[in-house]
Image: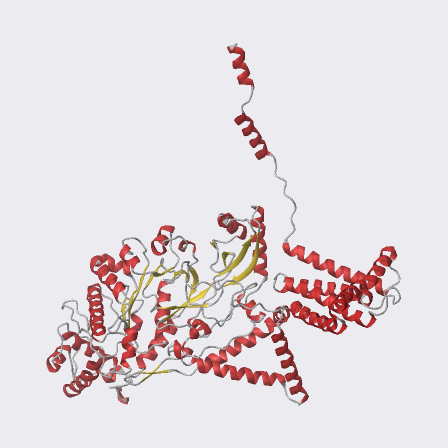
Amino acid sequence: MSGKGSSRRTTQPTTSTRRRRSTSRRRSSPQKHAPTVRPEHQRELFALGLITIALVTLIFFTTDITGNVGIVYVVGMQQAFGSGALIVPLGMGTLGVVMLIQERIGDSPLQGSTLLGTFVVLLAILMLIEFPHHDIPIAERATEGGGIVGSTLVQLLDTAIGRPAALMVTMMLLLAGVLLMLNITLHDAMVGIATWMHQMRITMAGGDPDADEMEDESEKGRSTRTTRTALTKPAESQPQPAKQGQPTSAGLLRRGNVSNPPDANTARPAGEAAPAPGTGQKEPSMIEKIAGAMLARTTSDEESDTEKSETHAIVRPEVLTRQGIWRLPRLDLLDPPVETVITDDEHRVRARIIEETLASFKVDAQVVGVNTGPAVTQFEVQPAVGVKISRITRLEKDIALSLAAPSIRIQAPIPGKAVVGIEIPNSSIAVVGLRDVMDSEEFYTSKGRLKLPLGKDVSGIPTIADMNRMPHLLIAGSTGSGKSVAINAFLCGLLFQYSPDDLRMILIDPKMVELIVYNRIPHLLSPVVTKMDRVVPTLKWATQEMERRYKIFARHACRNLENYTALLQNRSDLEPMPYILIVIDELADLMMVAPQDVESHICRLAQMARATGIHLIIATQRPSVDVITGLIKANFPSRIAFAVTSQIDSRVILDTPGAEQLLGRGDMLYMARDAANLMRIQGTYVSDREVEQLVSFWRSSKPPAGDLRTDDTSSEADARPLDAPEEEHDPDLVSINADQPSQQHMFLSQEEEALLLPQAAALLKKHRRVSASMLQRRLNIEHSKAAQLIDLLEQRGLIEPVQRNSSNA
């Protein structure tokens, strides 16, 4: 019994065994994929079908050779639609042509309002044809009138509201159908008719309507240039831009946005989420899409020429301070922006590859929009109902393989939109010039006290950040990724906006080659710091200056620098306080020399210095935990990550991966303080020649209080005293001496500078030589202030930067 039972148990397969066998058979059986037709092919086939029906109907009605099917078709159409039998196929053919034109221009889906409007217009026309013949029975009037369809609708309205009201309702239906079909409002239609009548009146009077339009455009350009001259004025005093109408297709093609174009005149601060679809954005009409796309290439050159002429006409702005009027540099010092030509062919191919790749993995999704930026192009992919976003993000490498792209980045979802963004590198990276960002509507209309030109986002829109809201910035990236170029762009952007009375700087450059070009500009509180032993005293002075400002604020019941500046308007006895920007080009070198002192001063400034108007920009090429410590990260909520070598470095700077996929050459991820998502930006580029031109302008600028230089002291050689001995000169920071303890008033205030500098010049003229020790004894001041007077005499060309002994320096 036991043997039979055991043999029976071994011959009968268990349930789990049968399940495994059936599963293996299902896995081994080949899957049968149903043939699929691409969406664009479906649209083309549908449009061609409509055109074919229209042409066949036209042949049936105009010839006698129709066949049996043709005869039945003609009779049926005449009975159903009467005299309007040709209107129905004509509308179908027009709709098919429009679908083909849209497919070749913008690849935008045909809107439901267009279909509904076409249907309403056809019914209204049939009813209007029916009204004159409605009293005659259908059997007696043959093919006249609106046929069965028109007669039925007119009979319903006539019975319900009477003949006159029915006629009025039909006319309103026709008007509503036309507006829906053309996707325009009644106001837009009235404006278009008024414009057309105005042009016809000018033409009949013998004028030139094009010249009148050019005159109107020139008036708009003059008003725009007048607004742009107020580059350095507060945002509250700038006039708001006029509300712009519908965007033209020419602008859409240049920016590359196919479905949801952004408003070019709407300033979007860095880190702020884009508006949701349908909120505040006006969809362009079908007529504007077709006409604008046909005229885009012919008008792009004219628009670029107009923009260039407007930029060259910018008047040099001026800033009024207590000391006088500072003349700010013009944007003409910068190179003009280069217009980038964008074609749609590559976008179409990539969009089709993305859809086919997702379809091969059974992911139902469609590309509904394209945003072209300087470095990457973002494809907006809308998944079908029930498709998880994770199924798309898991296919990141597969999509990159299909596109033959070095790397892609998936943003799921795009903030404010119900789509997933797939960012693909462009074939060539476009250069985002400083002038291109600063001479934009986004820059002029953005509200901020210390505006930094970051660059352009993936949609090609200039991105502006407010240093006062950050309030400090941490930058990290590998060598050659664009950190130093970004810092130069930020500094140049501030130098174009603010005078030395509004903004002062302390530049710390351990590499000795990046920021040394800014020496001798009036914005610097001291020459560029390049020696390690001078860094800690400099940071210590900044901390003490912060404490001094807080004491003044407490004495006058002010919470921050803005309140104190407002108090200065009514108090002439108070000392004006400019913003102070401290820039450290390489933090890793400082952390190797004095990590505890540097970290303590940086953290203290980052925690408390915002209200006093002191801000920090720190950059490093080694984003490791021993350089960017936890305390430093906690006090720098605003960060910029350029291309790094590993995902670990990206997590150190951004707390999330992604920076290792950047392209370099200015491609960066910006984490704003008040934004939950990272923003990808192509950084602003400024060349060495542009920096030198700007620095030369500020070096040659005279202070409002008057310049001590005369006409015969144009060169430094002429300004050097003849009997001055050759002494050793320390080119580094003179006003902060590492060998002496830091004092609360280590730097000269503006009142002290105005009082002591003429006395120092008088001593130089009397003795034909000057030194820090002599000024310290004769003027009874501290050694650090005497050394700063020496630097000021050098900057004004009264003495040459001679070699001085350390005892006299």
The residue nearer to you, when weighing 422 against 202, is 202
Q: Is residue 600 above or below residue 772?
A: above
Q: How many marks?
A: 0
Q: Is residue 44 above or below residue 288?
A: above
At a point 58% along the width and 46% down the height, the residue shown is: 360
At a point 14% along the width and 67% down the height, the residue shown is: 739
Q: Is residue 809 visible?
A: no
Residue 450, image x and y in percent?
A: 35, 72
User: Residue 282 appears in which quarter of the rendering?
Assistant: bottom right
Residue 715, image x and y in percent?
A: 28, 83
At a point 28% along the width and 60% down the height, the residue shown is: 587
The residue nearer to you, when weighing 532 against 176, is 176
User: Residue 162 appears in which quarter of the rendering?
Assistant: bottom right
Judged left or right of residue 14, residue 646 is left
Residue 85, image x and y in percent?
A: 80, 65
Residue 388, image x and y in percent?
A: 51, 49
